Amino acid sequence: MAETTGVTISQLPATTMLNPTDRFEVDREGGAYSITYDMLVSELKETLGLLELVDALTEIIG
C-alpha cells in the first residue's frame, strides 16, 4: 500500500498530465505492487496488440 501522508485522495491536487515515472499501486491477491505509467502503457499496448498495429501502419505510411 502507498504510504499515508494524512490526506485523502480527494484532498490531493488534481493533475491533467501523467509523467512516465508516475507510479500506480496494483493489488494482486492481497499483495501490493507498483508499476510506472510508462510501463503500464507499454504493457497495455502489447496486451492489446497495438504494437503490431503501429508497426504495420509505420510500414504502410512510412
Image (tube, rainbow, N blue to C red):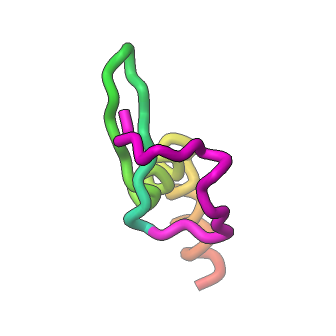
Percent position of residue 33, x then y? 32, 35
Quarter holding the C terminus is bottom right
Instruction: Give yes or no for residue 6 being in the magenta stretch.
Output: yes
- Front position in the image: 56 or 15: 15
Q: In this rendering, would 32 be left or right of 10? A: left
Q: Is residue 37 above or below residue 25?
A: below
- Residue drawn at (58%, 42%) of the image: 8
Q: In this rendering, would 10 be left or right of 36? A: right
- Residue drawn at (42%, 34%) of the image: 26
Q: Main secondary structure of the magenta part?
A: loop
Percent position of residue 42, x then y? 44, 55
Quarter holding the N terminus is top left
Q: Is residue 56 above or below residue 10?
A: below
- Residue drawn at (62%, 63%) of the image: 13
Q: Is residue 18 above or below residue 58?
A: above
Residue furthest out toward the top: 29
Q: In this rendering, would 9 be left or right of 44? A: right
Percent position of residue 9, x then y? 60, 45
Percent position of residue 36, x then y? 39, 54
Question: Which residues, given as a range, are shown in magenta?
Answer: 1-19
- Front position in the image: 47 or 39: 39
Q: In this rendering, would 49 be left or right of 43? A: right
Tell me where residue 25 sits by quadrant: top left
- Residue drawn at (55%, 66%) of the image: 18
